[in-house]
């Protein structure tokens, strides 16, 4: 995908991946929402409180680098899980997602 960015006052067309394009699109929407809130709270006091309570919450608090690192890690993890057997995948998910200890997983799976 091609996006146009402003670099040193000049518009530059750049090819980006779909993930980067989606991230930039979400960032644009966030900027629009912040401008809307700023116009709504023209005296500035309530707007500062709005930023404090909403900035850094959820996915929108990520930097582009953090987002890409998280997505790369997720893709690598999914690739590794695809090479595992069904029982290995189940044991990993019980540990990573459900927070079970190795002993608890052993009892559930009937192994020691």
Image (spheres, helix red, strand yellow):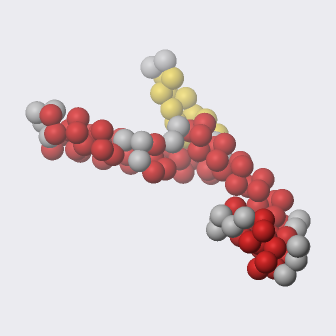
Position of residue 49 in the picture relative to residue 78 (left or right): left
Q: Is residue 86 visible?
A: no
Question: Does 47 sit left or right of 23 as displayed?
Answer: left
Out of 111 and 91, give the one closest to the viewer. Answer: 111
Is 42 rendered above or below residue 91? above
- Residues 33 and 106: in front is 106
Q: Position of residue 10 (x, y in %)?
A: 48, 22
Q: Quadrant of residue 94?
A: bottom right
Expressed as whole percent of the image width and height from the top left, the position of residue 76 reads 78, 53
- The residue lying at 23 percent from left, 35 percent from top is 48
Asked if residue 19 is positioned above or below residue 97 in the image, the reply reads above
Q: Would residue 68 be seen by someone viewing this image from the given angle? A: yes
Q: Position of residue 100 (x, y in %)?
A: 69, 67
- Seen at 81% across and 59% down, the residue is 79
How many marks do you count on the picture? 0
Work out which residue is located at the far left of the displayed protein and give it. 43
Would you identify the image quadrant in which residue 108 lies? bottom right
Lateral position of residue 80 relative to residue 8, left or right? right
Q: Can you say whether 66 is above or below 98 in the image? A: above
- For residue 52, which quarter of the picture? top left
Q: Residue furthest top?
A: 8
Which of 22/75 is in front? 75
Residue drawn 72% across the image and 64% down it: 101
In the rendered image, which quarter contains the C terminus? Answer: bottom right
């Amino acid at each position: 995908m091609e996006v146009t960015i402003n670099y040193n006052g000049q518009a530059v067309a750049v090819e980006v991946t779909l993930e980067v394009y989606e991230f930039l699109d979400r960032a644009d929407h966030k900027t629009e929402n912040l401008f809307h809130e700023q116009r709504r709270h023209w005296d500035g006091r309530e707007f500062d409180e709005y930023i404090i309570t909403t900035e850094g919450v959820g996915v929108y608090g990520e930097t582009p680098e953090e987002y890409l690192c998280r997505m790369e890690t997720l893709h690598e993890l999914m690739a590794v899980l695809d090479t595992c057997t069904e029982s290995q995948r189940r044991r990993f998910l019980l540990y990573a997602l459900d927070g079970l200890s190795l002993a608890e997983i052993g009892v559930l799976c009937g192994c020691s």
